[in-house]
Amino acid sequence: MKIDTHATHGHTPSRFNELLARWQQYQPLLELQNRLRDSRDRIAISGLAGSAEAFLVNGLARSLDRPIIIVTRSTDEAAELHEDLLFLMNSERLAFYPSRQILPYDFKAPVGEIMGQRISTLAGMLDNRLSVIVCPLRALMEPTIPTKVLASSRVDIEVGREIDVEDLVERLVQLGFRRVPLVEEVGDFARRGGLIDLFTPGSEYPVRVELFGDTVETIRYFEVGNQRTVGQVERVTILPKREIPITQETLETELGKLPEEDADHIRHRYLNDPELPGLEWLSILFGLEQGSLLDFLPHNAVVLLENEEALREEAEEVILEAESLHARLRERLSQLPLPTEYYLSPESLFKRLEERTQINHLPFRGARSDVISFNCQPHPAFNARLDLLGKAIREYREQQVEYVITTDNEGQASRLDELIQQKAGLDELPHVEVISLRAGFGCPDAGFVVLTDHELFSRHHRRIRRKKFKEGVAISDYSALTKGDYVVHT
């Protein structure tokens, strides 16, 4: 199995792979796999600590020929699980579907990276390319582009095929792309003679399409900052920039459907703002068809709920929040979509989820006998006492318990080696490997323990967030700025 890390000599994840192999043969996991194959009944599980849930999802993805969607209570929980899974499985089969991170009845637009993640995830589901999707509850409740609209909106460009450049430019504008002199962000495109540069959602880099007459000669990825080629492909698929198919050119037609005072209020908010903030909820007022992530999910999918009871409570909170925002804006607009016209109602959401096989991850087993318990334990507390770590490692050896200490990079791994040799009192090198996990855990019944360096020293784990889509260019000097330029402060 390939582990996606940057480990180098001395700290490659060989021991970690052995622990993964043990997990694959762990009896509760085998029981869960068998029940998923033989039945569509709801299954309850418990006893997962630390990053054990990522082990579970990876194990299921390797053994089941059906997609898995994990629904968490918050965006942070979903992002943490997704990051853990990136180190355990093929990232091409894994996706994170975030919430829009904007609220209904507010005049704001989602940021480009979030729009790109959502659209590219939906496209991957439409093509049956994904085996694991992680999403927070709010994202599941939010509307999105309908499946048929996304399917008909995609544009394929292939080397050797002829294209009508003027038609392509018109189509890009319809998909929400912005024509600019230089492509910098998702949703930008530029045309210079026989070259068309564009930055589509779902791509880490913008692409440059080179034409010979009307025939596509090459398709290359390039860096935003220096324009250098970083790869070449035979085919590229262009996805819509946004889930709402409304542009500056078609906006007035939609506003004509509203009372004049409402339309004027929205026109005023859109003055000098090409992003058209608020379209996500206004599109419902305009009568546009809405879709749901569940429309893209096959009926044979497995739904893993992070504590169904807690999720139901969160769903009610989402609606209550929206009702408060709705009441506030009613003073300014005479017509507004109801909160349950924007969000899926809790009742509708969980009824649709019941149509698929469900796993309910409970925080505690309690007295229930039908719950599959994995009996994992939280990371032991060492409070930076390496002598206690040394004692624990000697006990692991005596009990034939396998262990590994994970760390984020090679520098930290080498330093940890030195510290443990100096202060832990061990007679051999510890098993330190470069693997970034949110939290360690023990699995006594499977005979292994995963330790993390940040928990050894009681530190908060801070991952460096990797942007899926590289946007913008940095200025080399303040003299490069001119009046009217936008500046982002970090």
Image: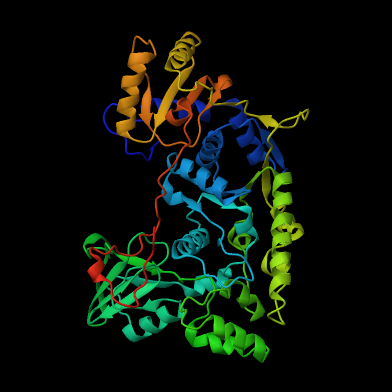
Q: Quadrant of the C terminus?
A: bottom left
Viewer-proximal residue among 56 and 433? 433
Image check: 259 left or right of 274?
A: right
Residue at 46% over, 37% down: 461
- Quarter of the image for residue 98 reads bottom right
Residue at 72% over, 30% down: 365
Q: Is residue 422 above or below residue 478?
A: above
Residue 1 appears in the figure = yes
Residue 17 appears in the figure = no
- Quarter of the image for residue 371 reads top right
User: Where residue 197 sits in the image (x, y, percent)?
Assistant: 30, 73
Viewer-proximal residue among 39 and 5? 5
Residue at 26% over, 66% down: 478
Q: Is residue 287 above or below residue 20?
A: below
Q: Is residue 15 above or below residue 112?
A: above
Q: Is residue 413 above or below residue 362?
A: above
User: Where residue 101 sits in the image (x, y, percent)?
Assistant: 56, 60
Image check: 431 left or right of 449?
A: left
